[in-house]
Amino acid sequence: MDPDLNGIVIIAGNYGSGKTETAINLAARAAMAGKKVKIADLDLVNPYFRTREARISLEKLGVEVVLPDKKYMHADLPILSPAVADMIRNPAQLTLLDAGGDDVGATVLAALADFFKNREVSMLQVINPFRPSTEDTAGCIKIGKEIEESSKLKITGLVSNANLIDETEPEHILTGYELAKDVSRKTGLKLEFITASTQVLPELDLDRFDCPVLPIDRKLLPPWKSI
């Protein structure tokens, strides 16, 4: 079952958690389900994996993609397009904000604080147990607190995105699920959904999960794999 999210949803997480792939696939699946979807690229930290790289495929699905002005497309500066503020003022059925990695990337969200006032905003922390900072529950909670402090926003839910890219096996998905469940128990935050690549998904027993599963069709590749 796909996640059924609505309103303004921020996808945040530590560097390498896979939050951008999660945001892109969430946007694509929601659009294919008939929802009006907007997504903004606020990731000014990672030079390789960015929402803007999937712009064409998303727009073909009817997703409105908000990016910095063309002259700033490859800039690693906190440049906020007026269009981002406008999409917060006038959200679609699902409006996704792809935030930068770690607390550094989350500082961009703090610059939008005035626009978030008096609006219901969800912020989901994406967890990958195979990244150095989120190998255990304590690390996940620590990263979450750092994101909250930098963004001036509260995390409202969790996402397990357990993967080792091409080496991902079903047991890796289960490991991530159990870790996210423990973080959920310790923090009181809801595990909104887990992800699974379309290659691994057929091998999973979905009855083992008590939350939705988002199929991930990898739409982003680092430069060394796209040549």
Image (spheres, grey):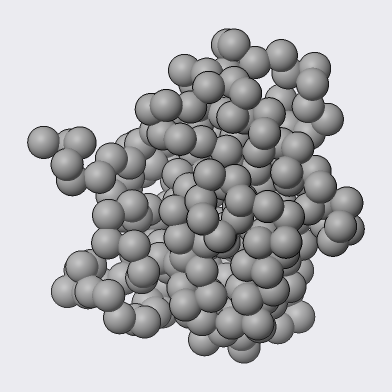
Q: Position of residue 121 (x, y in %)?
A: 71, 67
Residue 156 vs residue 10: left or right? right
Residue drawn at x 65%, y 82% as measured from the top left: 149
Front in this rendered view, residue 31 or 108? 108
Quadrant in which the C terminus is drawn: top left
Residue at 60% x, 55% y is 134
Q: Note whether 163 is above or below 104 in the view shown.
A: above
Name the image quarter holding residue 125: bottom right
Residue nearest the observer in this picture, 82 or 163:
163
Q: Position of residue 171 (x, y in %)?
A: 62, 23
Residue furthest out toward the left = 227
The one nearer the camera, 167 or 4, is 167
Q: Position of residue 135 (x, y in %)?
A: 61, 51
User: From where the camera sits, is residue 149 visible?
Assistant: yes
Q: Is residue 24 visible?
A: no
Q: Residue at x 47, y 17 (%)?
A: 199
Q: Nearer the viewer, residue 169 or 110?
A: 169
Q: What's the residue at 73%, 44% (across, down)?
A: 179
Q: Position of residue 50 (x, y in %)?
A: 34, 55
Image quadrant holding the N terminus, namely: top right
Q: Is residue 38 left or right of residue 156?
A: left
